[in-house]
């Protein structure tokens, strides 16, 4: 009798599209019992729910999540034009961040062309008066101010009607002595301490040094570039360079002259959102995933296909 009732309730709900209340009235049983029977029908396999997924992007997202143990993956259609691709990545990132950023969060923001594209799409903004946005890395020399982490951080904060703090220091200094002097400044030290305690980080992923936007900073001469190539650097996050296995290039002197959070500190942040795509960044993204730096990846379909190859 139970199986018969299960089938009858399931048929009325899933096939006839009756509500639980309508089924309750029709069969003379309580609404809570209808709910229990529907749950039992799923558990016992009387009802099987199948999603006919014809969206290849969703399939790639699922496969990326499984292969790289990601909390979430978001894949947008690949665009041959680099600027259009960054716009699509920025739109997708804005939707995600609107969903996950809550009042009281500390949100660390990196720098770069991809991250700079995001704030303009934060249309459906919130009023998060107790949320703080903070740069993860200091300012980058001659780079356009619109790509600087301080400027991008303010844009994010204004979009969410939130608070912000700034990091007034150069991202790269001449030597370790200068670095230690700057870090001894109370304002700089406190800013970096807060940044390291972010519970959400939004970062771009730089490609090979020869093609990276970081070259615009003016800090990288032939010596630095040659050293990074020698150490096998394939990309950077927050201006920190890593090798093909995702390990920090600790022997590269430039990595020890950065004012910003370290890669180990980045790993300790609860939710790191990586936003990057394009042919020249495929290896860098693959290495970042291998290094286990990201919890959420937003990328394009071409990159996703490469990442899913065995």
Image (cartoon, rainbow, N blue to C red):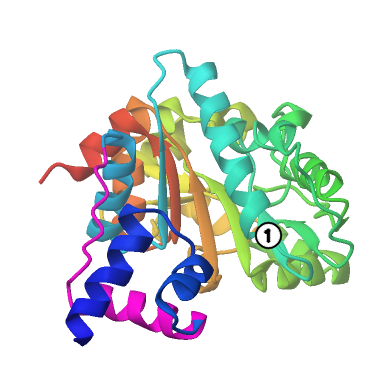
Q: Quadrant of residue 259?
A: bottom right
The question of residue 21 being in magenta is answered with no
Establish if 241 lies above or below 190: above
In this rendering, would 110 be left or right of 185? left
Judged from the image, the secondary structure of the residue bearing numbered disc 1 is: loop
Q: Which residues are magenta?
A: 31-53
In this rendering, would 170 be left or right of 250? right
Establish if 129 lies above or below 233: below
Counting from the top left corner in percent of width and height, residue 114 is at: 57, 33
Q: Quadrant of residue 143?
A: top right
Establish if 176 lies above or below 307: below
Counting from the top left corner in percent of width and height, residue 90 is at: 59, 34
Q: Is residue 304 visible?
A: yes
Dot 1, how many residues are within 10 Å of its Cα: few (below 14), some (14-19), or many (20+)?
some
Residue at the (61%, 27%) spot, across then down: 216
The question of residue 37 being in magenta is answered with yes
Residue lying farthest top? Answer: 81
Q: Is residue 232 visible?
A: no
Counting from the top left corner in percent of width and height, residue 68 is at: 28, 59
Residue at the (75%, 30%) spot, across then down: 146
Q: How many marks?
A: 1
Name the image quarter holding the N terminus: bottom left
Name the residue beneath numbered marker 1.
Answer: 101
């Amino acid at each position: 009798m139970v199986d018969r009732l299960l089938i009858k309730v399931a048929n009325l709900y899933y096939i006839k599209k009756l509500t639980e209340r309508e089924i309750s009235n029709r069969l003379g049983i309580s609404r809570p019992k209808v709910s229990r029977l529907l749950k039992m029908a799923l558990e016992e396999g009387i009802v099987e729910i199948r999603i006919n997924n014809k969206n290849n992007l969703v399939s790639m997202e699922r496969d990326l999540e499984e292969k790289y143990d990601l909390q979430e993956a978001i894949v947008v259609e690949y665009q041959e034009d680099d600027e259009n691709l960054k716009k699509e990545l920025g739109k997708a990132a804005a939707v995600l961040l609107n969903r996950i950023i809550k009042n009281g969060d500390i949100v660390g923001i990196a720098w770069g062309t991809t991250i700079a594209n995001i704030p303009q799409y934060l249309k459906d903004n919130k009023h998060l008066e107790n949320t703080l946005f903070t740069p993860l890395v200091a300012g980058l020399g001659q780079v356009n101010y619109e790509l600087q982490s301080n400027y991008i951080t303010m844009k994010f904060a204004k979009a969410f009607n939130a608070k912000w703090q700034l990091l007034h220091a150069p991202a790269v200094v001449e030597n370790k002595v200068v670095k230690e002097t700057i870090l001894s400044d109370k304002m700089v030290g406190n800013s970096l301490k807060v940044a390291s305690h972010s519970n959400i980080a939004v970062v771009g992923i730089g490609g090979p040094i020869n093609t990276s936007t970081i070259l615009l900073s003016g800090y990288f001469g032939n010596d630095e570039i040659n050293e990074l190539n020698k150490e096998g650097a394939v990309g950077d996050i927050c201006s920190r360079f890593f090798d093909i296995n995702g390990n920090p290039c600790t022997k590269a002197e430039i990595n020890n002259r950065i004012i910003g959070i370290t890669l180990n500190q980045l790993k300790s942040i609860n939710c790191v959102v990586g936003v990057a795509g394009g042919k020249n960044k495929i290896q860098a993204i693959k290495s970042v995933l291998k290094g286990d730096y990201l919890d959420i990846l937003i990328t394009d379909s071409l990159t996703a296909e490469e990442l899913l190859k065995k």
